[in-house]
Image (cartoon, helix red, strand yellow):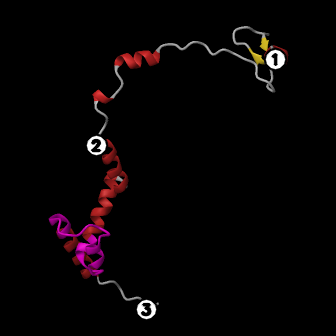
Amino acid sequence: MTDAAPDLDAIVQLWADAKIYWTARDFPKYGSEQWVALAPDDPRRLAAALEAAELWRKYGDEEALLAWFREAYRSRPSLAERRTRAELDEAAKPKPPHQLRATPGWPPVAVPGQPGRYLTYNARKEAA
């Protein structure tokens, strides 16, 4: 293999320049058209990548975070549009129990609270 040794001075210079751009916030957003247009060895390209990595480390997925913010700040119905206390009280009142009926073609229905009692469908009762 004849790989040339990396130019350490150039790498150190790239890192230092990227840090300067990062500190000055003088770089395009990572992945944007302006970022793609930068040369591969442009320190602003590295600064943007470092910024994106740091934001990912702190906040995770940017789109998920923005979606959370949109959901948190979406408008809610006003109190005047919501149900009143009287409507809520009416909805919370107990309902009358369901009347059990045997259905043709179904097995007998066990009557709750009365062990051993079953309702069975009687065709003669329906005809009458």
| Disc 2 element | loop
Q: Which residue is disc 2 drawn over?
A: 73
Three-letter amino acid code of the residue under disc 3 = Thr
- Mark toward the viewer: 2 or 3: 2
Q: Residues within 10 Å of mark 2 (few under 14, many from 20)?
A: few
Left or right: residue 41 versus residue 123 is: left
| Magenta span of residues | 21-46
Three-letter amino acid code of the residue under disc 2 = Tyr
Alpha carbons under labels 1 and 3: distance apart: 100 Å
**Above-or-below relation of 35 to 91:** below
Q: Residues within 10 Å of mark 1 (few under 14, many from 20)?
A: few
| Disc 1 element | helix
What residue is shown at x 22% (from left), y 77% (from top)? 13
Image quadrant for the C terminus? top right
Residue 13 image label = none
**Above-or-below relation of 119 to 31:** above
- Mark toward the viewer: 1 or 3: 1
Give x and y (percent) for residue 125.
Answer: 81, 14
Residue 127 image label = 1
Alpha carbons under labels 2 and 3: distance apart: 59 Å
- The residue most toward the left is 24
